[in-house]
Structure formats: C-alpha cells, structure tokens
Amino acid sequence: MARERGIVIYPNPVLRARAKPVDKIDEFVRQLVADMHRVVGEEEGAGIAAPQLGESLRIFLACPSRGEEPRVFINPKIEVAGAVSPHQEGCLSLPDIFADILRPAFVRITATALDGSEFSLESDGFAARVWQHEFDHLEGMLIIDRMRPIDRLSNRRALRDLERAGG
C-alpha cells in the first residue's frame, strides 16, 4: 500500500531544492496528484506544490476559487507583468506565518495537464498570485524569501520555533 503523504514543514530541505521536471505522467505522478488533491482539500488551501508533500517534482495544484475543482499544473512556465502590489499570503509549509508579499499583477502560465495535454491561462486576479506562490515552491523559494524586513521581524519567533522543531 502506498504511503499517505502529508504537508512537509519548514525547514525541511526539500522545500529549498529546485524541483525536477516530470518526464512522464505515470501511476506515481497520478498518486502524488491524488494526495495533493486530498491534502489541499483537508487544509482548505488555495494551492499546493509537490515539494510540500516531500516530492521534488515540478507539479502544483491551484484552486483559487472556493468550490472550484483544483487544476493540475505539470512543468509550468510563467511570464509575469504589470505593477507589483502587496497581498497577505500564508503557506501550508509555514504554519502561522503571514506577510504582505509583493508580486506582479499579471501572469500568463503554460503547463501540462494530468491527461498530458498542454494548456495556457492568463490572470490578473487572485489566481495569478496563487500561481506565482506555487511556482516559487518549484524554484525552492518560500514567502519568507519575499518578505519585507518588517514582516520578517514580526514573524521571527514563529520562524525560530519551526527551525527548532526541525521541519
């Protein structure tokens, strides 16, 4: 029986590694995506990336609208544009840590779906922010890397507690 994956917590090193491309969509990838669906639903998150379940693969799910089925993004590529604006973000791998993160407003994303078809989407709304956040995970980047110094200071104790717990 396959192990049931759960959220990997900072400072686990998998969260800092650049994820590897998916070469083929096989049963392993399908099971990973099923686990991602389960966990993002349980946690009521807007998205989740494979590294957050301990797998260094370029896959994320995004479900920026409540009640909407999460969409699978495999080997995504993004282009960003527009004015940068702040918005409060949290992260399932960084419990109890929130900060205003600056991100460009517009994103064009191209990825492969679970059925192997390629698709492209554009957004200048909340979806654009979710895609950028999850794409950062594939690059080994976390919201703490994008925090302003004042937010880093206000989250210092929570970060230190996570580091002591060892992820």
Image (tube, helix red, strand yellow):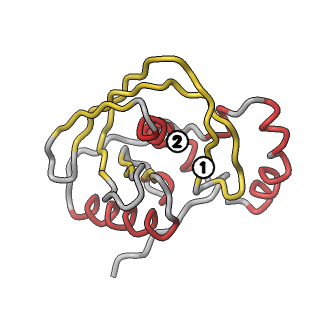
Three-letter amino acid code at disc 1? Pro
Viewer-closest of 42 and 64: 64
Q: Residue furthest top?
A: 82
Residue situated in front as seen by the camera: 134 or 129: 129
Disc number for residue 57: none
Q: Position of residue 155 (x, y in %)?
A: 80, 46
- Between residues 166 and 59, which one lies in front from this camera angle? 59
Residue 49 in percent (x, y) is at 44, 50
Q: Residue at x 61, y 36 (%)?
A: 87
Q: Point out the image quarter for the C terminus.
A: bottom right
User: Considering only vertical position in the picture, is 121 above or below 30?
Assistant: above
For the residues marked 1 and 2, what is the alpha-carbon distance in whole angstroms?
7 Å
Local secondary structure at mark 1: helix
Question: To which residue does mark 2 refer?
Answer: 17
Residue at figure coordinates x 25%, y 62% from the top left: 30
Question: What amino acid type is highlighted by mark number 2?
Answer: Ala
Residue shown at 55%/28% (left/top)?
103
Q: Position of residue 34 (x, y in %)?
A: 32, 66
Element marked by disc 2? loop
Whether tag 1 and tag 2 are in contact, CB under 8 A, the answer is: yes
Q: Is residue 116 left or right of residue 81?
A: left
Query: Dot 1 surroundings within 10 Å: few (below 14), some, or many (20 or more)?
Result: few
Q: Which residue is mark 1?
A: 13
